[in-house]
Amino acid sequence: MAGHSKWANIQHRKGRQDAARSKLFSKLSKEITVAAKMGDPDPEKNPRLRLAVKAARSQSMPKDVIDRAIKKSQAGDAADYTEIRYEGYGPNGIAVIVECLTDNLNRTASNVRSYFAKFGGNLGTTGSVSFMFDRMGEITYPAGAGDADTVMMAAIEAGAEDVESDEEGHWIYCADTDLSAVADGLEGALGEYDEAKLVWKPQNRTDVDLETAQKLMRLIDTLEDDDDVQTVTANFDVPEEVAAQLA
């Protein structure tokens, strides 16, 4: 068990503070539509859709917007989105993984490549950096869910593999294929979680200086602002003294 990444904590707070609600809802709606189209439109019969709906509710997305996104998946004119992953290196060789849902692969590839180039990085081929990450399920709880030992015991009982806890909260990790089952088990033991999702968890993180952190933040912010981009993950961390200057 360890403290969570300082950068991840900064990013988490930042997302809650200044994310554009319309853009956030658009990305969540897209995931709901894709999940419903790929499986059953009933969240109780579709684990991916169930998690997507819970993620939307955790961000206070109105029920009618969620229902509309599910219905859109069944419409004959619904956009045909493709899931695609881009991998590359940001400033100072930091590994970056970008996950997208797009209806225009040429547009998305061109945009992502230009963002990397603009901020001192370069786009690589599939597999060029993902070997430095583990694909896992991540369930997030606030600090008030319990002390570290309580959460650890609940996580073990639910079938999780690892827990990271600090004053900000608890991050519970499991095999990607077990995410829905572990999330359900934890919900029974600890109550409703903040978030449950599939992530690319860095095997190791590289501490960065202030200049590199600022460049990476600009790259990540620009990527996340693109409508086709769903998630951005990088294998860096921010030392406390640098985090204080960024906060």
Image: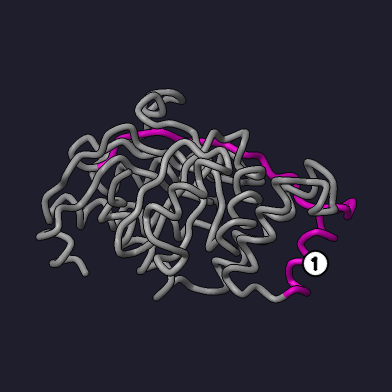
Q: Examine the rendered structure and indicate whether residue 127 appears above or below residue 57.
A: above
Q: How many marks?
A: 1
Q: Position of residue 141 (x, y in %)?
A: 47, 60
The image's colouring method is: one colour
Bounds of the magenta segment: 63-90
Q: Amino acid at mark 1?
A: Arg
Please tell me whether residue 88 belongs to the stretch shown in magenta: yes
225 or 175, nearer to the observer? 175
The residue drawn where x is 72% and y is 53% is: 50
Is 156 positioned to the left or the right of 15 in the image?
A: right
Q: Position of residue 62 (x, y in %)?
A: 70, 76
Q: Position of residue 209 (x, y in %)?
A: 11, 50
Q: Residues within 10 Å of mark 1 (few under 14, many from 20)?
A: few
Q: Examine the rendered structure and indicate whether residue 62 appears above or below residue 110.
A: below
Q: Position of residue 6 (x, y in %)?
A: 25, 55
Please tell me whether residue 175 belongs to the stretch shown in magenta: no
Image quarter for residue 125?
top left
191 or 101, nearer to the observer? 191
Q: Examine the rendered structure and indicate whether residue 112 appears above or below residue 146.
A: above
112 or 23, nearer to the observer? 23
Give the residue at mark 1: 68
The residue drawn where x is 54% and y is 33% is: 175
Secondary structure under the numbered disc 1 in the rendered image: helix
Is 149 positioned to the left or the right of 67 in the image?
A: left
The residue drawn where x is 32% and y is 60% is: 9
34 or 110, nearer to the observer? 34
Q: Quadrant of the C terminus?
A: bottom left
Q: Quadrant of the N terminus?
A: top left
